[in-house]
Amino acid sequence: AQSVTQPDIHITVSEGASLELRCNYSYGATPYLFWYVQSPGQGLQLLLKYFSGDTLVQGIKGFEAEFKRSQSSFNLRKPSVHWSDAAEYFCAVGATGTDKLIFGTGTRLQVFP
Amino acid sequence: GAGVSQSPSNKVTEKGKDVELRCDPISGHTALYWYRQSLGQGLEFLIYFQGNSAPDKSGLPSDRFSAERTGGSVSTLTIQRTQQEDSAVYLCASSLDGQPQHFGDGTRLSIL
């Protein structure tokens, strides 16, 4: 069955520190992978996507993610975190660009000044 | 508008009542999705529309839940005889074919 695992429920970092949020997926074929961010009371905003091609993808707000097929992972990274990055982050997988999304349980990021 | 619009933003109702949630997708987006976000279950897919047809309604939890889409645009999610376990945030998303989904801010539904 298709699934997405985000092992870290809650992460706390200091402003300016680097960040890596983990995502592992279980999927029978080459998946379409997404990272979304959700601020309190808001919907989900797309940070970046991987459909094919270059396995290192750049997104908005200085985020990037790397698709590693051998590890079934799609980890999200940012070299220097800003206080405004505090939010909940969701990794998701789909069969196609239009398919329904299967989400991980999310990682809540807290940023200390 | 520029984004996906959902109404109402908040809805409080009594157990047993019917509720309707509305979604206005981004203009021109042919695909429309409904998801539910709850503390216990996380983000769950409910139903997917392509135009006015629903090729995938596999996520609807029971026959109390139904949805329709008219004119290839607005969609309504209806929950009949609401139960307390229906309390959640209901998110709508839309997309162009093959493109990522854009989400609305959701409707927070509370069942008393």
Image (cartoon, helix red, strand yellow):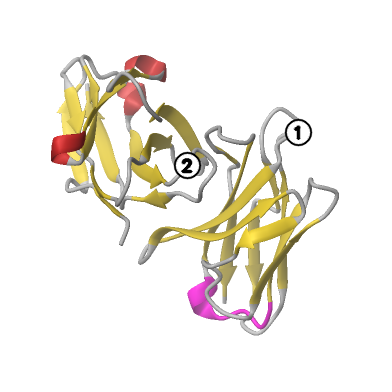
Closer to the camera in the image, B112 or A67: A67
Question: Amino acid type of disc 2?
Answer: Thr
Residue at 52% in and 41% down: A43
Q: Quadrant of the N terminus of chain B?
A: top right
Q: Chain of mark 1?
A: B
Mark pair 1, 2: CA separation: 20 Å
Residue at 23% in and 47% down: A6
The residue where tag 1 is placed is B28
Classify residue A13 by image quadrant: top left
User: Mark 2 packing: few (<14 Cα in 10 Å), some, or many (20+)?
Assistant: some
The numbered disc on residue A96 is: 2
Would residue B18 appear left or right of A96 to someone viewing this image?
right
User: Mark 1 packing: few (<14 Cα in 10 Å), some, or many (20+)?
Assistant: few
The image shows residue A63, relative to residue A35, as above or below, that is above
Residue B92 position, x and y percent, is 61, 49
Classify residue B79 by image quadrant: bottom right
Would residue B58 appear left or right of A79 to someone viewing this image?
right
Is residue B50 found inside the magenta-colored segment of the image?
Answer: no
Q: Residue furthest right?
A: B71
Closer to the camera in the image, A36 or A58: A58
Residue at 65% in and 51% down: B9
Residue A87 position, x and y percent, is 35, 36
What residue span does the magenta drawing correspond to? B80-86
